[in-house]
Image (cartoon, helix red, strand yellow):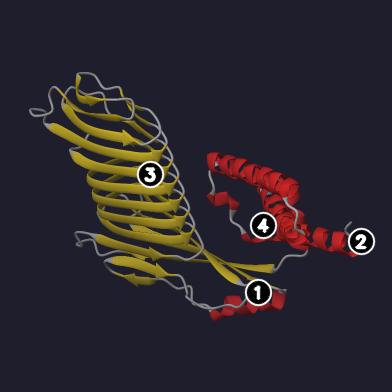
């Protein structure tokens, strides 16, 4: 029988893991379906721990199983309450945050054919969109975290948050500074640029979402590790978008595109423009809405390892039609003035092109 001290220690472990899960895991980067998968996975692990505890005849193994169950249970509970107001009480015992917002504006060279935008973030989101003004405006919101207010303010003063501004572009690289244990820096960027210009985009983040809105780009290179990528009316000659944990959504038209994610779905609306699209995900579905226009021809190859593939396009001639693998093209593909080629693949998820 466990003593009172052991039970108290287990309770403290559970509370500690629960607080850490709320404070240091960015649950906002997970989509609802990913949250559901995590809860189910946590339940399966807890069930396995229960079964192993019934079969175990070793005190050491019993304690290890019990510890694993405590940690998994605390993390799952933290996930469930992270989006509710119940999580705000953690700030009482959590590190203190300091926040600062800086804004810079100016104008680009009117004669420049293309303008470059480079944003390299560690923890934070990037939003790049156009407006009607002929000037640009970049807003940087930085947040530091320390164990007290003095420490948080000190960390804020040690970092440089000024972007590099030139007549042909703008760039910002989040400071690479070791703040120490349990301290961190987050930087969110919002950049407004003139609408009737052409851009070369290179946006990256480790923990944060990337959003591009109403941009005409010669090239667009978008990457994040933990966060979704949103493309709102993006037109590009060449597009590369990659995320590890997050979905890729939006509306786009591009000559050549490679879009991939590991844990997340791809949900896109394509506009009428000749182009080649390579889409891939491991854990997630792919859904594409394409224009219903007789002037557009489609060539499609779509494959899923585990789920159904559907192509619902008028006059589509199947060269291969199986439940998990579809290949073919529309009857007008060779003569159509606009040709769209799509290659889509997923491991765990369905594919639907309509």
Does 148 appear above or below 256? below
Secondary structure of the residue carrying tag 1 is helix
Residue at 25% across, 39% down: 343
Q: Residue furthest top?
A: 315
Nearer-N-terminus badge (2/4):
2
The residue that disc 3 covers is 281
Camera-side mark, 1 or 2: 2
Crowd tier of the residue under label 3, counting other residues whose Cα lies within 10 Å: few below 14, some 14–19, many 20 or above: many
Residue that label 1 marks = 152
Q: Nearer the viewer, residue 170 or 249?
A: 249
Give the foreground label among 4 and 1: 4
Left or right: 150, with 298 as reference point = right
Farthest residue in the right direction?
4
Residue position marked by numbered label 4 in the rendering: 21
Q: Classify mark 1: residues with Cα within 10 Å, few (<14), some (14-19) or many (20+).
A: many
Secondary structure beneath dot 4 equals helix
Image coordinates of residue 160 in percent, x first then y, are 49, 77
> Whole-Å distance between the Cαs marked 2 and 4?
26 Å
> Observer-nearest residue: 217 or 258?
258
Q: Quadrant of the C terminus?
A: top left
Q: Quadrant of residue 294?
A: top left
Q: Is residue 125 visible?
A: yes
Give the mark, 3 or 1, whose residue is nearer the N terminus.
Answer: 1
Asked if the residues shown at circle 3 and circle 1 are in contact, with their CB atoms under 8 angstroms apart, the answer is: no
Q: What is the crowding at mark 2: few (fewer than 14 residues within 10 Å), some, or many (at least 20)?
A: few
Mark with earlier residue (4, 1): 4
Place of residue 274 in the rendered image (x, y in percent of width and height, measured from the top left): 17, 38
Lower sequence index among marks 2 and 3: 2
Query: CA gap, disc 3 to disc 1?
Result: 39 Å
Can you identify the residue that label 2 sits on?
Answer: 4
Per the model, the C-alpha gap separating discs 4 and 1 is 21 Å
Whichever of labels 3 and 4 marks the residue nearer the N terminus, that label is: 4
């Amino acid at each position: 029988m466990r003593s009172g001290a052991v039970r108290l220690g287990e309770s403290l472990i559970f509370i500690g893991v629960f607080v850490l899960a709320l404070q240091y895991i960015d649950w906002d980067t997970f989509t609802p379906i990913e949250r559901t998968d995590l809860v189910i996975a946590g339940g399966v692990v807890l069930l396995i721990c229960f079964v192993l505890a019934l079969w175990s005849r070793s005190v050491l193994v019993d304690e290890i199983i019990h510890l694993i169950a405590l940690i998994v249970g605390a993390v799952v509970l933290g996930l469930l309450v992270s989006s509710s107001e119940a999580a705000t009480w953690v700030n009482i015992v959590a590190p203190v945050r300091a926040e600062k917002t800086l804004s810079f504006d100016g104008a680009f060279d009117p004669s420049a054919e293309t303008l470059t935008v480079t944003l390299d973030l560690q923890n934070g989101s990037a939003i790049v969109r156009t407006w009607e003004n002929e000037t640009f405006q970049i807003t940087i919101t930085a947040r530091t975290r320390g164990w007290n207010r003095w420490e948080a303010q000190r960390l804020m003063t040690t970092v440089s948050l000024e972007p590099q501004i030139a007549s042909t572009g703008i760039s910002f690289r989040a400071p690479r500074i070791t703040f120490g244990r349990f301290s961190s820096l987050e930087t969110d960027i919002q950049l407004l640029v003139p609408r009737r210009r052409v851009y070369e985009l290179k946006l990256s983040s480790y923990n944060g979402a990337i959003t591009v809105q109403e941009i005409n780009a010669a090239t667009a290179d978008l990457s994040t590790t933990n966060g979704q990528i949103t493309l709102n009316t993006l037109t590009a000659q060449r597009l590369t978008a990659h995320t590890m944990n997050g979905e890729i959504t939006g509306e786009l038209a591009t000559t050549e595109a490679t879009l991939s994610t590991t844990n997340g779905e791809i949900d896109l609306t394509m506009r009428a423009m000749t182009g080649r699209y390579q889409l891939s995900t491991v854990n997630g579905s792919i859904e594409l809405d394409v224009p219903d226009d007789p002037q557009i021809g489609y060539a499609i190859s779509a494959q899923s390892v585990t789920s159904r593939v559907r192509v619902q396009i008028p006059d589509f001639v199947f060269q291969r039609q199986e439940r998990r693998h579809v290949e073919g093209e529309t009857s007008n593909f060779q003569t159509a003035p606009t040709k769209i080629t799509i290659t889509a693949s997923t491991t765990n998820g369905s594919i639907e092109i309509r």
